[in-house]
Image (cartoon, rainbow, N blue to C red):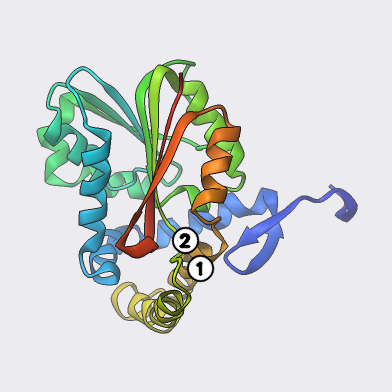
Amino acid sequence: MNDSNRKETHFGFQTVAEEDKAGLVHGVFSRVASRYDVMNDLMSVGVHRLWKNALMDWLVPQNGQRLLDVAGGTGDIAFRFLNRAPGASVTVCDMTESMLVEGRERAEAGTFADRLSWVTGDAMALPFPDHSFDRYTISFGIRNVTRIPAALAEAYRVLRPGGRLMVLEFSQIPVPMMQWLYDRYSFNVIPVMGQVVANDRDSYQYLVESIRKFPDQETFAQMIRDAGFERVQWRNLSMGIAALHSGWKL
């Protein structure tokens, strides 16, 4: 492709060719996979666990449901869903095999083995038939997708009529002073923490930057509506550090 036809996107604060972003993101998560869960606890002081529980409270898992958890990596959402609905089933789909390896090695994976499957796949081209799932979740993953509208379109495609999308993602704090304080923490502490704990400053610098490039709550809600979802709602968590978005395929 010549330069005049090249489509560009962001990788953190860098501008890159669209076709290069997936490989760059894959590299980040391949490098951090072994320390991913530990770093989540450290970066959020454990609050990410409360956010994921809030997702479950709003989602209300039910026995018999089929959940697709995209960018589900180490299984946090899958295990929570099955703990609340032991008669449900979950497919975890992630583009990074090393993240899935970490998930399969967790003790809960053995407990739920007959109701749990692990699939390597791309959020923008899911390897599943139309109308395959009752629920679709993606947590802290959609901001890493090259084309977010394509991922939302795929979510709509694989959900059954009456199915529900739930997105948990870092977002924007509506109070400028609080956002300023959070930015100081994010840019000055998290990359250093990544260097000390995971020996990888650059990956965590990208992760911080990627949060700042993600749309605000209402802009993202409109993207969900544009993909065909109805009854779209969102809720701030921790003053907007993260947000939950919900939409229905009706």
| Mark 1 lies on residue | 206
For image coordinates 45% across by 77% down, the residue present is 183
- Name the secondary structure under disc 2: helix
Q: x and y percent of residue 96 in the render?
A: 43, 47
Residue designated by label 2: 28
- For the residue pair 188 and 71, the one nearer the viewer reads as 188
Task: Name the residue: 61% across, 54% down.
Answer: 21
Residue 134 badge = none
Relative image position of residue 9 (x, y in whole percent):
68, 55
Amino acid tagged 2 = Val
Secondary-structure class at tag 1 = helix
- The answer to whether one can see residue 86 in this image is yes
Badge 2 crowding class, 10 Å Cα cut-off, few under 14, some 14 to 19, many 20 or more, is some
Residue 189 sits above or below residue 88 on the image: below
Of the pair 226 and 13, the residue shown nearer to us: 226
Residue 71 seen in the current view: no
Q: Are marks 2 and 1 in contact (CB under 8 Å)?
A: yes
Residue located 49% across and 63% down the image? 211
Answer with the quarter of the image where residue 124 lies.
top right
Residue at (81% x, 51% y) in the render? 6
Which of discs 2 and 1 lies nearer the camera? The answer is 1
Relative vertical location of residue 121 with respect to residue 217 in this rendering, above or below: above
The three-letter code of the residue at mark 1 reads Tyr
User: Would you say 94 lies left or right of 104 here?
Assistant: right
